[in-house]
Image (cartoon, grey):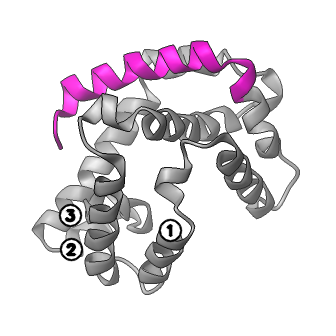
């Protein structure tokens, strides 16, 4: 779990320096990213978003997928989302220092800000997208992401469900 979660902090071939299961988690994350990024449902879902979003469509869809997963977590996984999030916080906190000196601080911010459960709430999602927009050095449409999600909510939700089914077939319980 920790290797998968912190994978974006592990650049290039640095995963080779990690102990076994951490490295496997990083590689799993990369395989899932590739699978999702090249999936037909994702390509189709991009057409649900206005042309103004350009290359940001993929970033927005990643956040939207998190929203749909958080919204339907119990239905999709059979797990209580609160119990899962508490377990995730413990695991990530216990292993954060393996990946990056700031990772433990990130886990604490994630916990106090209720990031994982918050993805289910559109107001929370709007704050996240506006914060992401502010981090880019140039003008971008990320802050308008929730409006785009609301405008295409049903078709994007359907794309997610089909993508989720294929993710389950491909990766199962990993």
Q: Are marks 2 and 1 in contact (CB under 8 Å)?
A: no
Give neighbour class at mark 2: few <14, some 14-19, many 20+ (Cα, 10 Å): some
Magenta span of residues: 149-174
Q: Nearer the viewer, mark 2 or mark 1?
A: 1
Q: Main secondary structure of the magenta part?
A: helix
Residue 144 magenta-highlighted: no
Q: CA distance from mark 1 to mark 3?
A: 23 Å
Residue under the image location 67 percent in, 54 percent down: 128
Image spot of residue 162 (x, y percent): 39, 16
Where 121 falls versus 47 (above or below)? Answer: below
Judge by depth and name the residue closer to the eye, 23 or 13. 23
Q: Mark 2 — residue?
A: 18
Where 43 falls versus 168 (above or below)? Answer: above
Q: Mark 1 — residue?
A: 110
Which element type, helix, strand or loop, lies under badge 3? helix
- Which of the numbered marks, if any, corresponds to residue 23? 3
Which mark is first along the chain, 3 or 1? 3
Q: Are marks 1 and 3 in contact (CB under 8 Å)?
A: no
Which mark is first along the chain, 3 or 2? 2
Residue under the image location 25 percent in, 70 percent down: 91
Image spot of residue 72 (x, y percent): 42, 32
């Amino acid at each position: 779990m920790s290797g998968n979660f912190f994978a974006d902090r592990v650049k290039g071939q640095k995963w080779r320096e990690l102990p076994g299961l951490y490295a496997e988690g990083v590689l799993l994350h990369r395989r899932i990213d590739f699978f999702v990024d090249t999936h037909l449902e994702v390509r189709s879902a991009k057409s649900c978003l206005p042309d103004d979003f350009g290359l940001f469509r993929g970033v927005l869809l990643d956040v939207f997928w998190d929203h749909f997963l958080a919204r339907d977590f119990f239905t999709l996984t059979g797990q209580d989302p609160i119990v899962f999030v508490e377990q995730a916080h413990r695991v990530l906190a216990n292993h954060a220092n393996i990946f990056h000196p700031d990772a433990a601080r990130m886990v604490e911010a994630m916990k106090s800000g209720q990031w994982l459960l918050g993805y289910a709430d559109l107001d929370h999602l709007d704050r996240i997208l506006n914060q992401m927009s502010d981090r880019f050095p140039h003008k971008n449409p990320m802050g308008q992401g929730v409006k785009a999600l609301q405008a295409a909510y049903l078709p994007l939700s359907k794309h997610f469900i089909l993508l989720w089914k294929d993710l389950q077939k491909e990766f199962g319980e990993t």
